[in-house]
């Protein structure tokens, strides 16, 4: 094991679009829904993209 060395790769962070909601396992559904409603009503958006990460994929 002395010959091996762990190399960490930097994660490529993509910027979040203003019409995009990323759902994680730690957030509550109520907060996601209320944020989506404000995007639809106040900002005049007609489309919202939900993206789930990790274990939150099963929650959708």
Image (cartoon, rainbow, N blue to C red):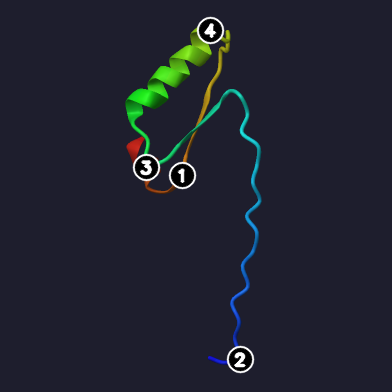
Name the N-terminal-most of marks 4 and 3: 3
Helix, strand or loop at mark 2: loop
Q: Residue at x 65, y 59 (%)?
A: 10
Image: 10 above or below 30: below
Distance between the alpha carbons at the discs numbered 3 and 2: 37 Å
- Residue 12 rendering spot, x and y as whole percentages: 66, 51
Residue 42: which numbered mark, if any? Answer: 4
The label on residue 17 is none
- Callout 1: SS: loop
- Residue indicated by mark 1: 53
Look at the numbered disc 4 and give the secondary structure of its residue: loop
The residues tagged by marks 2 and 4 sit, at their Cα atoms, a distance apart of 58 Å
Q: Is residue 51 left or right of residue 19?
A: left
Q: Is tag 1's residue or tag 2's residue first in the polypeptide sequence?
A: 2
Real-space Cα separation, disc 1 to disc 3, in angstroms: 8 Å
Q: Position of residue 34 (x, y in %)?
A: 40, 18
Residue 3, numbered circle: 2
The reply to whether dot 1 and dot 3 touch (C-beta < 8 Å) is yes
Residue most toward the bottom? 2
Q: In the shown orientation, is residue 12 left or right of residue 28?
A: right
User: In the displayed structure, would residue 40 be above or below residue 31?
Assistant: above
Q: In the image, which is nearer the foreground, mark 1 or mark 4?
A: 4
Q: Gap in Å between the C-alphas at discs 1 and 2?
A: 34 Å
- Which residue is drawn at the image coordinates 52% and 15% (left, top)? 39
Q: Is residue 9 above or below residue 47?
A: below
């Amino acid at each position: 094991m002395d010959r091996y060395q762990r190399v960490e790769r930097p994660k490529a962070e993509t910027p979040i679009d203003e019409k995009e909601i990323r759902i994680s396992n730690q957030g509550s559904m109520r907060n996601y829904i209320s944020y989506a409603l404000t995007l639809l009503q106040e900002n005049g958006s007609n489309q919202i993209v939900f993206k789930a990460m990790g274990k939150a994929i099963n929650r959708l």
